[in-house]
Image (cartoon, grey):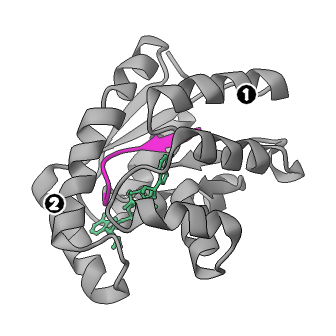
Amino acid sequence: MLIMGPPGAGKGTQAELVAKRFAVPAISTGDIFRSNIANETDLGRRVKPYLGPGLYVPDELTNEVVRDRLSQADVADGFLLDGYPRTLAQVDFLDKVLAEQGHELDHVIVLKVDVDEVVKRLHQRALKEGREDDTPETIRKRQEVYLEQTDPLIAVYRERGLVFEVDGLGSVEEVQRRVADAIEQPPQ
Ligand code: B4P
């Protein structure tokens, strides 16, 4: 399963709940990058210059992180990718890794939330958590990068009959019920 949507749509929030409900690991490339930055690892030092200004980490680096994570034993019975893939090159790479490992993609959950709402949510998160990439300027940049590079991927997965659009407005619990309903439907 994949969960997609603009920055601040609630991917991370919903991914954690899906992981609990369906007993699968949620794999967030954003979380992996942030924890490596916090722990001052070599990977952290390499990705920090991108996350700060709201740019995507280069595909080669991101793809290797995902390949490593998908080689761990806990993904054998399924997993949820949160925030990956974000570029066409990542879509191609994921197809290759899934084929190598004998996994098949079933659901692509797309959270639909308008720009005004995501900007509001990210401003609130900035006040609560103080994430480096939640400044007004970076929030704008991340929305731009998303529209240019990631939004077109939805069409690719739609053609494969995998896309389930979910209204991301409402309480976290309401959105979670919609996401769970979508996951319980078979792909078209
Ligand atoms: P991510 O960690 O994926 O961050 P995000 O898009 O900002 O957040 P998300 O949509 O998960 O929102 P959240 O649940 O937190 O990426 C961060 C950065 O990492 C990227 O900008 C990029 O630099 C890099 N990166 C990651 N993956 C990459 C890739 N594949 N390739 C290249 N670079 C990559 O929710 C946001 C806020 O809304 C929270 O405060 C939450 O509490 C609130 N919220 C959630 N649901 C709500 C609801 N229903 N109502 C009200 N508020 C809600």
Q: Residue 20 falls in which quadrant of the image?
A: bottom right
Q: Amino acid at mark 1?
A: Leu
List the residue tagged with mark 1.
98
What is the secondary structure assignment of the residue under circle 2?
helix
Mark 2 Cα-neighbour bin, 10 Å: few <14, some 14–19, many ≥20:
some
Q: Residue 182: horizontal and vertical position, in percent? A: 46, 37
Dominant SS of magenta comes to: loop
The residue furthest right is: 73
Some atom of ligand 1 lies within 8 Å of the CB belonging to the residue at label 1: no
The vertical placement of 108 against 138, above or below, is: above
How far across and how far down the image is residue 30, in percent?
51, 60
Classify mark 1: helix, strand or loop: helix
Q: Is mark 2 within 8 Å of ligand 1?
A: yes
Q: Quadrant of residue 123?
A: bottom left
Name the amino acid type tagged 2.
Glu
Horizontally, residue 84 falls left or right of residue 153, namely: right
Q: CA distance from mark 1 to mark 2?
A: 34 Å
Q: Earlier in the sequence, mark 1 or mark 2?
A: 1
* Residue 185, percent from left and from top: 52, 30
Taking the image as drawn, is residue 169 in sight?
A: yes
At 59% from the left and 46% from the top, the residue drawn is: 62
Q: Residues within 10 Å of mark 1 (few under 14, many from 20)?
A: some
Q: Does 38 appear above or below 102?
A: below
